[in-house]
Amino acid sequence: MIQPLIVFINPPITREERFGEMAKHGATAPPLGLCYLAAVLRQAGIKSRIIDALSFEKTMEETVKEILSLNPRYVGITAKTVAIFRAAELASELKKINPDIITILGGTHVTAVPRETMERFPQFDIGVIGEGENIIVELIQSLEKSQVLQSVNGLIIRKSDGTLFITGPRPPIENLDSIPLPAWDMVPHLKYYHESATRFSKLPLGSVITSRGCPGKCLFCDNSVFGRRFRAHSAHYVIEMIKYLKSNYGIKSLVFYDDYFVADKKRLKEICLRMIEEKLNLEWVCSARVNAINEEMLLLMKQAGCFQIAYGIESGNQGILNLQKKGITLEHVRNAVEMTHKAGIRTKGYFMIGHPTETQDTIFETINFAKSIPLDNFQATYFTPFPGSQAYDIADKYGEFEKDWEKMNMWDIVFVPQGFTRHSLRSYLKMVHRKFYLRPRIIWSYLKLMRDPKYRIQLIREGFAFIRNVIM
């Protein structure tokens, strides 16, 4: 085995830490960001490895042992906010055994709050701010040549005296097609990753991100890594990714993890037509804004294999939607869900409770609105002001905000709006799920799914988890 120069880590964190009480419902997917970084390094002739400790629930001890067995010079750790403490613990354990390892932190959290993160966790030597693909090669080459890192834009560096230095900003990648296909071969076979049975019956499952950036201005959203300007792979690149996954892994289902997959109508049409013409025969899901779809688009997506579209609805109260800067109306939501249903595509609505200015009445407005439209799946989480979002800076004006990064998984409560308690929010979260799912139409839809043996076992497991979490 060739010794890697750098090992990339998706750090060990339990399902309970990631999903709170909904741990049994949690899905796993390959760490696409790390796969892109490994692919870029491979193109430059630099050896790397990926350890996906998160998805495969490795312990901290197992992860440290595996990393050290590879004897790398550099360890790159990615971390969202909820994983930052486990990432720091991993870096600390590595430093105890081999102080010469250079630890590099990347991901959404350090990009959102670079100085605060590096000050809090001295075990990280370097932080990567923004998109890593256009930084990582220059960074590793500079380290290998012992060059001054201050000239490498897009970094926060811990200097020898312990002080921190932020280099110049790194512009976003303009041509996403210049990035090689993700190094899926460096993670376990895709068949070991899984999704909810309510989304897919055909496995193995693949996942891709085909665009970056979202022009939305939602109060609760952190888009510090990819920014607000929409950029996308060409339709040709997207089809090549899909065909690679199909020929090498035999995928039968696909998740588009884009924030705004339907933004470019011309590109979307070309992708769908190519999927139809080349008979890729996949069922797939994506997310979309409710004010960005039309009937013609939905019919083409359905023909191309689209199985479900998830919409970020958030609330059934227009005042809250306005405060959250969603840029949509309840009429937009109703029209989009009805059009999608009519096109034969399943719909999923993402909601939150505990918004700033939330009241008992607005929570009931939300669940009543959700019940009044033909949604197939409903998911409500707690309003969570993430670092880097506008909400993070103003939440304490509307209630009690506990800035505990470890709890920021959307299933643990960190923000309690005025007029509520943590106990009442938990009760309301369970209530809205009960009111949505314990209806004859929804129960019957799941009973019909259970006729298919491919769904049955997983649906039974998810059913018991549902009963335990929202009924008992």
Image: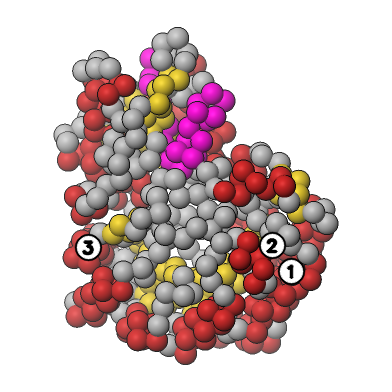
Choose top left, top right, bottom left or bottom right for residue 72: top left
What secondary structure is marked by label 1?
helix
For residue 244, above or below residue 306: above
Above or below for 64 versus 344: above
Q: Is residue 116 magenta?
A: yes
Q: Amino acid at mark 3?
A: Ser
Disc 2 packing (10 Å; few <14; some 14–19; many ≥20): many
For residue 234, the mark is: 3
Q: CA distance from mark 1 to mark 2?
A: 7 Å
Residue 353 is tagged as 2
Can I make out residue 332 in this image? yes
Crowd around label 3: few <14 · some 14–19 · many ≥20 (10 Å): some
State yes or no: discs 3 and 2 in contact (Cβ < 8 Å): no
In the rendered structure, which amino acid carries the disc numbered 2?
Ile
Q: Position of residue 238 (x, y in %)?
A: 25, 63
Report if the CB atoms under discs 3 and 1 are less than 8 Å apart. Answer: no
3 is within the stretch colored magenta:
no
Q: Amino acid at mark 1?
A: Ile
Q: Is residue 453 left or right of residue 302?
A: right
In the image, residue 303 sits, relative to residue 5, either above or below, namely: below
Q: Could you tell me which residue is drawn at 35 percent across and 86 percent down?
A: 296
Residue farthest toward the top in the current orientation of the protein: 161
Looking at the picture, how far across and down is residue 203, in whole percent?
39, 67
Q: Disc 3 on helix, strand or loop? A: loop
Q: Cβ–Cβ below 8 Å for labels 1 and 2?
A: yes
Residue drawn at (41%, 58%) of the image: 214
Q: Quadrant of the C terminus?
A: bottom right
Residue 20 percent across, percent down from the top left: 65, 51
Q: CA distance from mark 3 to mark 1?
A: 41 Å
Decide which of 140, 360 is in the foreground and name it: 360
Relative horizontal placement of residue 172, taking residue 81 as reference (left or right): left
